[in-house]
Image: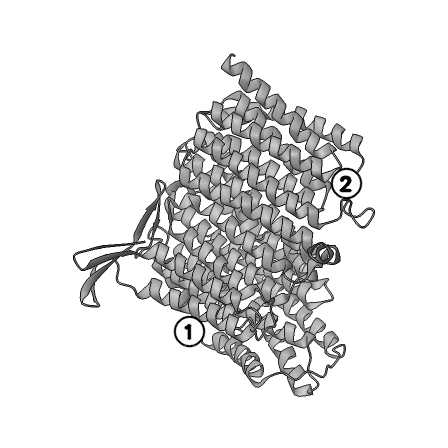
Amino acid sequence: MDLILLLTLLAVLTSIIGAALIAVEDRRLGVGLLVAEYASVGGLLTLAGQPGAALSRIGVGACAAAILVITLRRIPPKPRQADPQAPPGRWFRLAASILVIAAAWGLSGSAVSLLPGISRGHAVAGVTLLALGLLHLGLSEDPIRWIFALLTAQLGFEVIYAVLEPSLAVQAILAGVHLGILLVGSDIAVRQWPAVAKGTES
Amino acid sequence: MAGRGQGNGIVNAPPTLLGLAALLGAASFLARRRAVLSSVIAGGGAALLGGLALGISLDAPIQWLGGTLKVSGTWAVLGRAFVLDDGNRAAVSFIFLAGAFLLTGSWAARAVAYLPSFGLLMIACVAASLMIRPFLYAAPLLEMAAIGGCLVLVGDRPQSHRAGLRLLTFYTLAMMALLLTGWMLGTAGVTSATALEAERVFLLLAVGLAVLLVVPPFHSWLSAGAQASDPYTLAFVLVLLQSAGLFLFLGFLDSFGWLRESVELASRLRWAGLVTVGFGTLWAASQRDSPRLMAYAVVADVGVSLLLLARLEASAYQIALGMAGSRAVGMAVWAMGEANVAHAAAQARDTRLAALSSFAGASSVAGAPLTAGFPGRWAALGLLGRSDAWASGAIVASILILTGSIARVAFRAEGAVEATAERSSRARRFFLATGVLLIAALGLFPQLLYPWVIRAAEGLHNLIP
């Protein structure tokens, strides 16, 4: 398959996964979408000639899935309080995501001119994920959704940065940052439901 | 970490320091149920590591156990390096020793049990950020420190999760901005000659540093933390991360000549400083409780530092560094007093001592005369006085308004404290009294603190010749 076509398809797929992650309400489904996001970013990095970075993202994605599944087993499936942390309706979130994707695709041209060396496809995927992550951050304060949002934003950044700076040391530190965010977010999520967590342990 | 051959050994200093910090952090964690022991391990360990960083003889053979040992300052890892040399050892030592000061007192301040262990790991991350080469990669290490900060901020108070999540969100965004800035400056070679790119560098740098220095609107984690987190833990996280941010900013200025000579940067820093002083002071004046007031007082204090940095001259950088040191002392003494006021003892004498400690620390952060914070403000006024009336006026107004607000809140709180049956230990009272005396001593004799703190920047040869 043509490389540019493949890159474009992956960029579109990444954007769709990012939007779906915002729209879905089931957090378990969200974990699956987050892992898919990691896999698609791995694909984008492979196409950029960074197989090491791609492999590390897929490894971190697997760790993310394990940590989040364990976390979700220790907390109730729905937020305990009805509203304060719950994001607005699904259709609203989907509409906002589509608007953000449209804006991000427009802005990606500026990213290409600002950062010479990255392709349009990588810029589109990177800026879109970054923007969707920021949107998601603004929509919820639920720690699990916060993890989804922050990791989405960081993956978007890394799609661009890994192309610019292929240093293995930096990639390793950034992978450590992913794991740190996952662990801290999970810890906070579990601490918010101490009684339930204790019940699960016993 | 170490290699041997024919009775000779080579030890790499950076991994040794970081490894020891990790081990001591683990030991402190295991002892977390014994607050005093945990604090002593972490505080003593940090002091030891600070002493090692400053005093160890680098790249020269040392006679040891019948053989020779050579301590190398360079550790290459995955194509990058961590370097401890004469240029940064004072700064690394400063971070460890300042951390030791704060961690040792954590038990007296009834801080969260995890603070000594995770605090030491945070200090190690900040020290690593000072040692990594090129220094532009310091940002992810500061993010690691922020991850630790998030954990201790939430600590055993789940209701303070908002502060932790905001802190980590801001630091993640700052890391992205600073890594891109570093790439544009270091690899893409952006200079003032490329006006459009330089403009974008300014924007990214401004976002990154505004987060690290807690400049509005990136201060919201601080106000959220003041509401819900343990005061001493909040003070520790704030002081450590802010000091790291200041060092990173000075590193940028030191490395890129066009940046430190940029009139545009100076102008923007000045405006940012004026707005930050004004915002912090006015918001502090409108607060009714001490932690939130202090959060905004720190914002105002950072504003004064920005006004100094805007001068882009050596003496201003030195004063800004000195102010960072006195801010650490002031915040620690305030938080220790604040935590003990909250656990007020049946003895009126104990309550008064804790309240006095809280008041002295807060006054120092406000820059009131006869406190550790005043000499920095005075020196700033001396430097800015003639050339920038607006900045001088803002500093004087800030001192007056903040001191008045602190006195108002202190008098209001005095009658509201509920006595408990718990009695403060003699050692805790000793720490509180020492804190108050330290604030007064550093106010009267700033030469006890400033030369030592300023030495931390001795590796920045382009900034401070």
Provide the residue designation for mark 1: B448
Residue sticking out furthest to the front: A202
The image quarter in which residue B10 lies: bottom left
Q: Which of the numbered marks, if any, corresponds to residue A87? A: 2
Residue B172, percent from left and from top: 56, 44
**Relative depth, front residue between A192 and B71:** A192
Residue A88, percent from left and from top: 79, 38
Secondary structure category for the residue under label 2: loop
Residue B331, percent from left and from top: 57, 67
Q: Chain of mark 2?
A: A
Seen in the picture, residue B224 relative to B206 is either above or below; the reply is below
Residue B328, percent from left and from top: 52, 66
Q: Which of the numbered marks, if any, corresponds to residue B144? A: none
| Position of residue B95 in the picture relative to residue A181 (left or right) | left
Q: Residue at x 64, y 76 (%)?
A: B340
Asked if one can make out residue A71 in the rendered structure from this viewpoint, the answer is yes
Secondary structure category for the residue under label 1: helix
